[in-house]
Amino acid sequence: MTVKVISIVHGAVSIVNAVATGFGSAMGISLQVTAEIISKKGSGIIFQKSGGQVMIKKIIHYILPSNFINNNQLIINIDSEIPSGMGLKSSSAVSNAVALACKSLVSNDVDDEFVLNSAINASLYAKTTITGAFDDSTACYYGGFVTTDNYKRKILKKENSPTDLYAVIYLPNNKKRGDVTKLKLLSDIFLHAFQLAYSGQYWKAMILNGILTSTLLSSGYDITRNCLENGALSASISGNGPAIAAIVRQSEVKKIQSILSKLDGRVIVSRTNNQKATIVKELD
């Protein structure tokens, strides 16, 4: 029997970077990753596209029983709208999507916590994350705002984000990430940013996060400040960069997009997202 599962998980942007303290916050956006896994009689794992194979194979072996892997051929296809290596949680979205698809291959009952932990364990193994990125993973998986304790893998607060807002995201060309270990130099101030997020003051938290990350990662604050001066509700480097995300009302999208389009790089626009990860299973 041939089984095909298709999972969809969305991306996210940072509210508060968790590297400094282990406490983080993030918000879902509508850019998405689709993972398609086809299982049929045979053996071996076939990747339709290159990239992320170490992490994906680890997830497969975490979730699928060895006898299932040995007696079935798995065809993996990942399609992502999320630019990788930019701080937009592409790794978290991909790992979540693959874990959800794998679990759905062998069970009709999906344990969200098991899926998330499998994805995070594989990401740590593949060294695509420092803290486990529980904030990123949960924002991608559930959508909306999340505030988390990454080391305990605990959601401290989760709520929907406004549905009429957009993330206007600047992706600079040839911009390297800074030394993320420097973020710990101001861990007490990052903790204050987290406390703002936990109290529901997400835009203030994100602005403070932007000031801190720009300074410590030597990225410069001019672009972020320019967005705020021109009507953005909030703006910050997302993750460890180099992407910069500005949160704006629909009426301000074109203005902020025009400002960022004049810079060396490209701009993408994504609506905020509150939709949980989804799965479709087909039997043949």
Image: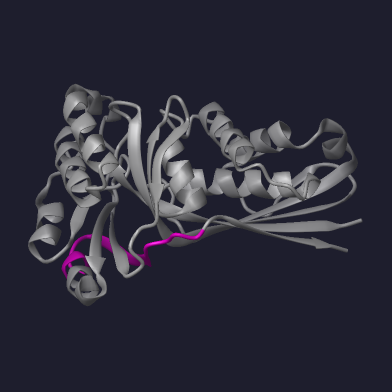
Q: Which residue is at the front of the view, 189 or 222?
A: 189
Residue 51 visible, this angle: no
Quadrant of image for the N terminus: bottom right
Q: Nearer the viewer, residue 128 or 195?
A: 195
In magenta stretch: residue 168:
no
Q: Is residue 11 left or right of residue 2?
A: left
Q: Quadrant of the C terminus?
A: bottom right
Residue at 35% over, 27% down: 22
Relative height, residue 243 to residue 251 (above, below): above
Magenta part of the chain: 259-275
Residue 213 in which image quadrant: top left
As drawn, which residue projects farthest toward the left? 229
Residue 247 vs 243, above or below: the answer is below
Please provide percent x and percent y for residue 154: 46, 32
How far from the left and from the top, in percent, is residue 268? 34, 65
Residue 228 lies in what quarter of the image? bottom left
Tally the numbered discs.
0
Q: Nearer the viewer, residue 168 or 196?
A: 196
Task: Evaluate whether residue 8 shows in this view.
Answer: yes
- In percent of width and height, residue 97 lies at 60, 50
- Residue at horizontal 26 percent and vertical 42 percent from the top: 197
Q: Nearer the viewer, residue 147 or 115?
A: 147
* x and y, in percent, of residue 267 in the image: 29, 65
Does the stretch in magenta take in 267? yes
The colour style of the image is one colour
Q: Residue placed at 42% from the left, 61% from the top?
A: 273
Please indicate whether residue 251 sits to the left or right of residue 146 in the image.
left
Residue at image location 17% in from the left, 62% down from the top = 232
